Image: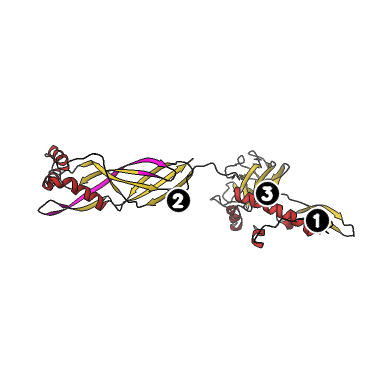
Amino acid sequence: MEFLKETRFIERMQFFNGQRLFASDLQGIEAFNREMRWLHNKSLHQPGIGNGFAVSGKKGDREVQIGPGYAIDALGREIVLTETRIEPVPPVAGEEDGAAALFDLTVSYPDDEFLAESETRAGVCGGEGVIRLKEEPVFCWVRLNQNRQPEDAGIKQEILSGMRLILAQVEVLNCRLNKDVSLARRTSARPAKQPYICCGRVTPCWDLWELTPFDPKKVFSSAGSSLASRESISFPIILPVGIQATIDTSDGGFLTTPCYTARISGSRVLEIKLNTGNSTQKLPVIVDGLIQIIEPLPRGFTLNVLLMFQALLSANSFASLVRAMGDSGAAELKRLVCEHLKYWSVEWMGVEG
């Protein structure tokens, strides 16, 4: 607002008995109250229709009717219509190809130089001056192109910035409405009642999460023997181990516990080195996880990832490899989890309200 740029602090005007007042003193009071009101509107509302400004018109009509209303532009200025207004339909036949021409009906705040003088008064020492200006909204028909965008780039920018507000859209053919007036493009000055959404991405410090002790030699060997007749097929297994991390969402500024969703970001295809005692073998694998969100709070949640494992080897070949690992299989698997999955990131989203 202009008065915030001109001063470092707010000054409230004050008077005393016997003080000589000038027109600038009284106009200063009015300007201060007006600017503070506009600042309130701009800070707590968005450009749009606050109340009223109903626009009606049926197919075949040559004019539209605009009801009394209240709106706010991007500077917080009040656009007020106190009585019903009739606006004639633009006198156009249509587009060159015979289709109906499209128009938006817009309203804007009047500039001071265009305000009508509604009352003047003579001064006590002679002369005459204006004491009342009529703030009438400015209505304008804006021609649209085939993409339903204003043809005038300057007017388009005024609409996008909130200095002009769209009240209605019409189709005009042979100087008449080709359809009933559409109000679909109107915006409301009231805060949107949509959920608050925030998201983020973090690479947490993962901890090993073990549901139950297990012997990978027995698990993989039994699974491999069941697939002995299908040696060319590798098999996915859900492991009873995983990774766990606490995800901090405090930057989202949630006031209540939101509905969280999350996904793992990182490579799923790995090549790991497996120590089998006498030698080290490279094992191509696919690792993914089943995600579970627990203990959700406004400032964070705990993420459990139950691992899914698939070796890119035949079933019998992989079973033989696991048997060769001996009793160190469980420890070796835990080491692989910690070494290769610590770079996985978490992408989360919270929806509040």
Q: Would residue 63 be visible to someone looking at this image?
A: no
Query: What's under tag 3, amino acid-wise?
Result: Glu
Q: Residue furthest right?
A: 125
The x, y position of residue 18, in whole percent, is: 84, 57
| Kind of residue indicated by mark 2 | Asp
Name the residue rendered at 38%, 40% in the picture: 295
Task: Determine which of the numbered discs, if any, sits on residue 238 in the image.
Answer: none
Tell us which disc is closer to us: 3 or 1: 1
- Please provide the residue range marked out in magenta: 274-302
- In the current view of this chain or complex, which residue is farthest to the top? 226
Residue 276 sits inside the magenta stretch: yes
Query: Distance of mark 1 from mark 2, alpha carbons?
Result: 52 Å
Q: Position of residue 151 (x, y in %)?
A: 58, 55
Badge 3 is on which residue? 78
The mark nearer the N terminus, 3 or 2, is: 3
Determine crowd level at label 1: few under 14, some 14-19, many 20+ residues with C-alpha closer than 10 A.
few
Asked if residue 176 lies left or right of residue 316, the reply is: right
Residue at the extreme left: 278
Q: Which residue is mark 2?
A: 251
Tell me whether the residue at label 3 lies in contact with that at label 2, contact meaning CB atoms closer than 8 angstroms: no
The percent position of residue 156, horizontal first and vertical second, equals 59, 55
**Image quadrant in which the N terminus is located:** bottom right
Label 1 SS:
loop
Q: CA distance from mark 3 to mark 1?
A: 32 Å
* Gap between marks 3 and 2 measured at Cα: 35 Å
Residue bearing the label numbered 1: 16
Q: Find numbered disc 2 in the image and state the secondary structure of the residue it sits on.
A: helix
Pick the residue in front: 282 or 169. Answer: 282
